[in-house]
Image: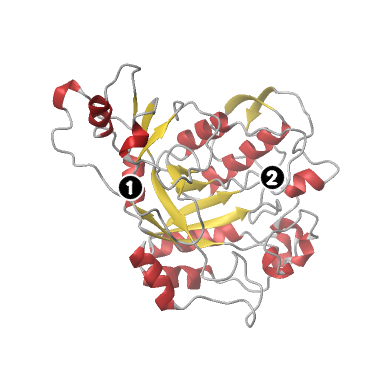
């Protein structure tokens, strides 16, 4: 479950004094405090951000090998056979979410362990290597069909971290491969894409792998309205860097209505407790241009967006907060007796209070 909390600037006189509205506005070295605040009043959400603000109440589904190992985080060494799913009823999921008033569902199609919930062409570490529907099952495809049936939007959580690609002897994460020109998607015999769009990026092996999987997700499972990037890194290898510029170009082209969580569109509020700051402002000071930035640190300061913080900005950027929290202790199911589950009253209190 998750929601968006926001404060919108008044839109009166936005064209005053020759200042144009924009999602990002640069601060000039000689700008006075008054000029900076005037610019901040002209920073507005994009169409996609504004649409995302209307979602308000979103389901967050964490489902994977951890559901069966009862671990909070996997280690990437799990045998896919541990994923012993027997029955799947995504219509029931979506009916319940619709009845609760949710408008979108974000599902972890790949958590940090690297196991995928769709029939990817680029790995065997996933649903295709389990006994579920004789290896032919595709949880994301089933969910996508149910979302359309119940009028809900789709969001995907694709972990940049990938322990399987680290721990596997032939893994691509941090393998010190050279950056060379690659065509996305990479052709796979017998698995052509209906979408014939191609991209050329100069990337290493892991970034190519990630881009190939993003291409699958954004072209074969219906319109995607949010791409959720977690910033957690349980383990790193080989100085692996993520080519966010390439990832964003792919997303903006293939999912033009999607916002990106963890990058320039939507930010983490700084905790997983369902709380936001006492003052949650959406105009955020940046030291670099968020449109070209490659690093987006977590923004956790209590004073984020307050007026005195705007004075030291080089860029003023609109970036709304989302806060996510679980109904259980941890994000994955572990058991029915020892793992505490929040009451409906507690969950509703979080929604109302924050």
**Residue occupying the point 45% across, 28% down:** 287
Residue neighbourhood size for the residue with mark 2, other residues' Cα within 10 Å, grouped as few (<14), some (14–19), many (≥20): some
For label 1, the SS is helix
Residue neighbourhood size for the residue with mark 1, other residues' Cα within 10 Å, grouped as few (<14), some (14–19), many (≥20): some
Q: Are marks 1 and 2 in contact (CB under 8 Å)?
A: no
Judged left or right of residue 237, residue 8 is left
Residue ID for mark 2: 121
Residue ID for mark 1: 51
- Nearer to the camera, 164 or 241: 241
**Residue occupying the point 33% across, 45% down:** 281
Expressed as whole percent of the image width and height from the top left, the position of residue 332 reads 62, 66
Expressed as whole percent of the image width and height from the top left, the position of residue 119 reads 66, 52
Q: Which mark is residue 307?
A: none
Expressed as whole percent of the image width and height from the top left, the position of residue 323 reads 44, 55
Q: How many marks?
A: 2
Q: Is residue 181 above or below residue 144?
A: above
Q: What distance separates the C-alpha of mark 1 from that of mark 2?
A: 32 Å
Expressed as whole percent of the image width and height from the top left, the position of residue 72 reads 67, 63
């Amino acid at each position: 479950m998750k929601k968006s909390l926001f404060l919108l600037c008044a839109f009166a006189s936005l064209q005053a004094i020759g200042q144009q509205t924009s999602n990002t506005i640069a601060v000039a070295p000689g700008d006075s405090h008054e000029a900076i605040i005037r610019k901040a009043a002209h920073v507005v959400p994009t169409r996609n951000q504004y649409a995302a603000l209307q979602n308000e109440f979103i389901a967050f589904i964490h489902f994977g090998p951890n559901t069966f190992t009862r671990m909070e985080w996997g280690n990437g060494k799990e045998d896919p056979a541990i994923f012993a799913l027997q029955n799947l009823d995504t219509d029931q999921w979506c009916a319940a979410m619709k009845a609760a008033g949710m408008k979108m569902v974000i599902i972890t199609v790949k958590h940090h362990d690297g196991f995928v919930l769709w029939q990817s062409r680029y790995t065997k570490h996933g649903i295709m290597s389990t006994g579920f529907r004789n290896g032919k099952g595709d949880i994301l495809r089933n969910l996508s069909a149910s979302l359309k049936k119940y009028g809900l939007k789709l969001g995907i959580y694709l972990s940049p971290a990938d322990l399987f690609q680290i721990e596997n002897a032939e893994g691509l994460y941090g393998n010190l491969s050279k950056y060379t020109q690659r065509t996305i998607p990479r052709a796979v015999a017998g698995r052509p894409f209906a979408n014939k769009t191609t991209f050329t990026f100069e990337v290493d092996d892991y970034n190519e792998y990630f881009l190939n999987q993003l291409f699958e997700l954004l072209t074969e499972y219906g319109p995607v309205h949010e791409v959720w990037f977690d910033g957690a890194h349980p383990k790193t290898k080989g100085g692996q860097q993520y080519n966010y510029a390439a990832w964003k170009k792919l997303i903006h082209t293939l999912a033009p209505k999607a916002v990106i969580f963890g990058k320039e569109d939507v930010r983490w509020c700084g905790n997983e407790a369902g709380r936001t700051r006492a003052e949650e402002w959406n105009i955020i000071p940046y030291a670099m241009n968020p449109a070209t930035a490659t690093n987006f640190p977590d923004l956790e300061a209590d004073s984020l967006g307050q007026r005195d913080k705007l004075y030291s900005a080089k860029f003023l950027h609109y970036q709304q907060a989302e806060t996510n929290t679980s109904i259980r202790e941890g994000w994955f199911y572990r058991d029915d007796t020892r793992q505490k589950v929040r009451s409906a009253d507690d969950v509703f209190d979080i929604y109302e209070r924050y």
